[in-house]
Amino acid sequence: MAMDSALSKGGAFSMATGATPARASGDPVADRLRAVQDLCDRGEPLELIMAAVLAEGLGPSERRRFDADVLAGPLGSRLDLATKRGAVRRREFVTLFKPYIAGVDARVKRDLPVARRIAFHLLEHRGIDDLADGDALQKVATAAAEPSKRIRTSLRWYADLPLRDELPESLYRLRAADLIPMTQVEDISWSDGRLRVSGHAYLAGLSVRSRRFNRATVVLRGPRWLPPVRLRTRRVFHPEATYGAEEAGCNYDWSGFTAELHPWALRWRAGVRAVVRGAKRLLRRRATVQDTTTWRAEIVIWSRGARATGLLRGPSSGRTERPSGLEVRPSRWVRPVWTSDRALQIVLQPTRAELTGVRLEGEKLELAVFLPGKGTGKGHARLDGHRISADFTPVEGGTAVVVPLAVSSLLQERDGGRLWVEPKGDPAASVMLGKAQESRSIVGEREITVLRDRRDRVIVSAHRIRPIISAATWDENGTLTLEGSYPGSGPAELSLKHRTGLIYTVPLERADSRFSVRFAPAAMPRFGDTVPLISGSWSMVVRDGREMVPVRVDHAILDGLDEAPRIRDGREYRLISTRFDVPVLAVAENLPDDEKGAGGVYSLRRAFYPAERARELTDATVYVASDGRQYEGNVRAIYEERVRRGDDREHIWVVKDGAFVPPGSQELGFGSDIRPTVVRAGSREHYAVLARSRYVVTNGFLPPWFRAREDQMVVQTWHGTPVKRLGNDLPHMSRDPKPPVWHRQVAEVRGWDLLISQSPWATPVLRKAFGYQGKVLESGYPRTDAFLSPEREELAAAMRRRLGIAEGVKVVLYAPTWRDYDRKSATLRLDLAEARRVLGPGHEFLIRAHAMQAAPNMPAGLGLDVTTYPDIADLLLIADVLITDYSSVMFDFAVTGRPMIFFTHDLQRYSAKRGLYFDLAAEAPGPLLTTSADVIEAIRTIDEVAAEHAERYERFQRVYTPRDDGKATARVVDHVFVS
């Protein structure tokens, strides 16, 4: 195979490789590595990737740097991929890779991470046939994917990885690439003039059970020749490190540390540096200038014979992200700061320019700045990259500077900028806020702000007027009240948004440029009920009209902001200010210590669950719907039927993240006193009930650690008759070797005792998709019984009231499925504004996005987002028209006999990407439409559309829902729990 040179003399890749960097960095190693990574990301052939790797143009030292990075990064990942994809891919990789690895410097290979070191040694020294057809590479890759044990021999540590009896011992020795300190800084504060840093630090895989043979030292390293600063550091007991660790079986209880710094250690070193630099400037006939000295924080760990050094990284969210500085003498500050990659630095920072005033006059914003020292009459200012003229006037003790900014120009800028002043002949000085007051100047519907950042530097920006939180309080009932300034009088609401797209809104109360908002995070309203916020971070914005306005925290309250957690109903809520002044509500489950982290999970799975599984079964039933996230569907219907019959055996619901509270018999209106037991998903009780309950009813896969007992009965109701291909019918499930999800499915399906099927048509489809050979009950789906219930009118009326839909309004439910290839899209294809214009106010649109799709971007006032409503069956009960595409909801809705419209704008692409089990165009009980306008027109003429498709609708019911007669639940309960 010919490999032409892929580099030009300038170091950029030629077009022949298809890997020209978008922008050269000036570092040929970084440019080459970026180009190789780009080829790998695009899935280019291995020949092209190796041509780029082997191309000329790097010097010896550059080649060593490049080889180290490419072997640990892109080529290592490509090897993992080839190892998983079977013998043919392995043979291709080994054949093309062998010539390259043989020429790599031995020191580069020695310093690679241990798993990569072993794999590349095998590639270099073993034959192609042996590696392609054997399992050596698979063994190493599989073991490397799990936390490996560490073995100490004498004073050296080794990795416990496969093939130790066949390969040299030196390959397994842990080196610098393997001994990387895992750190987190949990507090930075000043006490008695000293800086105290506390947190935890350990070497992954090396337990730290006591103070013995366990030392850590925080070291500050400054510019070049300055001697490092070693902080007084001691180890402390900190079991939280063990709970949060990713490695099971390791104990890091004594990995905590506290370190103290006296500023004098920095001051004398900075003084020496200032003398040297000042002398150099004087020799050049320039005036001396005070500058900032920066030290990076490292931690050196000695742990049971192993030694490693790494950067001190990882601030805890909240107060630790915004540590305060200390003025050690007038206009000279010591400040802890965080870099963009979350590493800690300590800076000794002189104040060379300080803001003294802000004044807005007409179309001009004037900033007054004072420069201490010698007076100067010339210079200019800069706002980020923009050079600005400024007036420099010598005054007593220094220079007064006035920086005029045009308001019209500021209002056109999208981002804020740091303010600098640059006296003629001197380096630019960042303007500090100092003792000046922050400023907010309102200009129309926008404001110009002059604020400080976390290092007290002045930031000037113009943007939409923002709500500013100036007070945050919690009451004894867990209600959070936020108050602050927000000029305006129109209606507005606070939106709490989760990273999953889930949104809750709370109305703002506004009066005299102030606002307040109250809500209880543990009891947020949802469709007439209350639920707690799910775990994770909730950002805050205010919806004002059609605009979404960010919320910020007043800098004046940051030091006193109450960030302590509040515990309510087993959940923890914290209001924190992150990224300096961005308010976030952090929510988490309040777990017992023995359930936290990988160690807790490992103990539950490997010790507690097997022990419980050996105990006698109880006559209880565990219900799991959507992994414990919903009270819905077939599982709900089976439970409610048993409660209606007065079955007082124990009923246990698995609930994840506080998603719901299952109702008892009295809440359901059945009169008796049957109360279900609730267990938290992932808890010790969860393991216990799945190990010891006689019956398990679920509509999806159970946890991977669950293994059904011979005397247990697992009833799989599934969550819908499949339209799109699933399980074994997906292309990736047939590749060799089988993917992990294939093995996961085999283990899961092996435990099923009964599969519920909606129809004779669905039975063979489900059997083939899951490889299931057990019993099937073609009962119809229990969740459709309500559509034919004698009380369906009363149920529908109650549901309408719950959603606030007036009588006589026609309900249109739009429920599309998810797209594997476009899951992050929140675009709503249906034009609701046009629908409102054409159809008028007599139609209410309910939008139900799939749980696997991004939350829909809903226009305000044009429909109701019911994506988070617990059970879609309730929505189908009140829907007069269903709009869907390739969702199994079509089968359930067919039981109602009401009209359906199929909005299949991407039918060809979806069929090619995912695949369908039947010809939708030939079988669908309604029209297939490709534009929003056609869908709206079909709704307008729905009676004619329904009549046109009546015959197909009846045929669809006969084939796909023949068992859904309102008695499906009774058949299931009689079969499982009575017979």
Image (tube, rainbow, N blue to C red):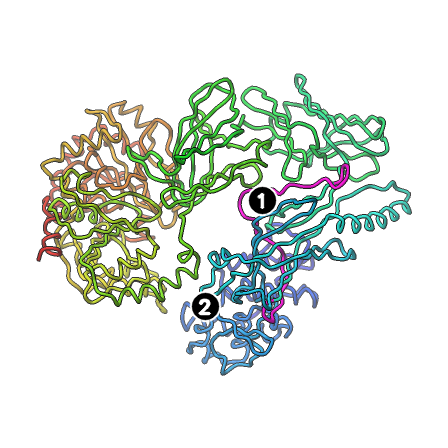
Q: Looking at the rendering, which quadrant does residue 407 occupy?
A: top right
Q: Mark 2: give few (<14), some (14-19) or many (20+) Cα within 10 Å.
A: many
- What is the three-letter code of the residue carrying label 2? Ala
Location of residue 288 with respect to 407 vertically, above or below: below
Residue 661 in the image, given as x and y percentages of width and height: 28, 43
Mark before the other along the chain sequence, 2 or 1 = 2
- Relative to 334, 133 lies left or right: left
- Residue position marked by numbered label 2 in the rendering: 82
- Which residue is nearer to you in this view: 836 or 560? 560
Tell me where the magenta segment starts and ends, as one range. 303-332
Location of residue 324 with respect to 79 vertically, above or below: above
Q: Is residue 326 magenta?
A: yes
Q: Mark 1: give few (<14), some (14-19) or many (20+) Cα within 10 Å.
A: many
- Relative to 753, 912 lies left or right: right
- Relative to 75, 901 lies left or right: left
| Labels 2, 1: front one | 1
Find the residue positioned furthest to the bottom: 166
Q: Secondary structure at mark 2?
A: helix
